Image (cartoon, grey):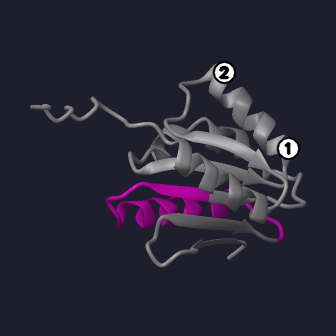
Amino acid sequence: MPIEYQWIDEEQTLVLVSLTGKVTIEDFYAGDVRLCAMLDSVTHPVDMISDYTGRNYFAAGYGDRVQKMDSLFRPNLRFTIFVGSELLMELFDLYNTTHEPVAFEYGYAETVEEARERITQMRAEERLIGPRPRSPELN
């Protein structure tokens, strides 16, 4: 399969998506099913690195797929870093300005190693979601 999905840590908190060769729109849809199954298999937050290194080709129908991004929504997908394709990042920014914004934070990195560093930094800076826990009463 030209799209590979793998957990890259034992705790299953980080998914690496790697694209190789020519990827068809059917490959993207099959990959979406695989990614959703991985996200659904855990209940904790998951971050993703999507490696498009050296790819500036997008299959016919890719624009239609991007418009269906809300079907990929999973509450535990937290951060996504796109690697190696500034064009993809520009398309994603365009999607977010013309459609409902995605429910996860995203960014760009030149390499997978840089993406891992960005995820580590983002995890360290993560804000609490929901109300703050009550402070203990001081006597």
Q: What kind of residue is marked 2? A: Thr
Question: What is the magenta range?
Answer: 21-48
Give the left or right position of residue 1, taking residue 13 as reference.
Answer: right
Q: Give whichever of discs 2 and 1 has the lower sequence position.
A: 1
Q: Which residue is mark 2?
A: 97
Whether residue 61 is visible, yes or no, is no
Position above or below: 72 against 135:
below
Q: Which residue is mark 1?
A: 86
Position above or below: 101 against 34:
above
Considering the numbered disc 2 on the image, is that residue within a helix, a strand or a loop? Answer: helix
The structure residue drawn at horizontal position 31% and vertical position 32%, both measured from the top left corner, is 130
Give the left or right position of residue 14, taking residue 118 as reference.
Answer: left
How many circles with numbers are drawn on the protein? 2
Circle 1 packing at 10 Å, graded few (<14), some (14-19), many (20+), is some
Give the left or right position of residue 27, taking residue 59 as reference.
Answer: left
Q: Position of residue 91 (x, y in %)?
A: 76, 36
Of residues 116 and 6, the one drawn nearer to the viewer in this rendering: 116
CA gap between label 2 and label 1 equals 17 Å
The structure residue drawn at horizontal position 38% and vertical position 37%, both measured from the top left corner, is 128
Q: The C terminus is located in which quarter?
A: top left
The structure residue drawn at horizontal position 58% and vertical position 74%, both measured from the top left corner, is 8
Of residues 84 and 125, the one drawn nearer to the viewer in this rendering: 125
Q: What kind of residue is marked 1? A: Glu
Q: Position of residue 7 (x, y in %)?
A: 54, 73
Q: Reply yes or no: does residue 36 show up in magenta.
A: yes
Give the left or right position of residue 44, taking residue 71 as reference.
Answer: left
Q: Position of residue 117 (x, y in %)?
A: 70, 58
Of residues 18 and 126, the one drawn nearer to the viewer in this rendering: 126
Of residues 31 and 59, the one drawn nearer to the viewer in this rendering: 31
Position above or below: 43 against 11:
above
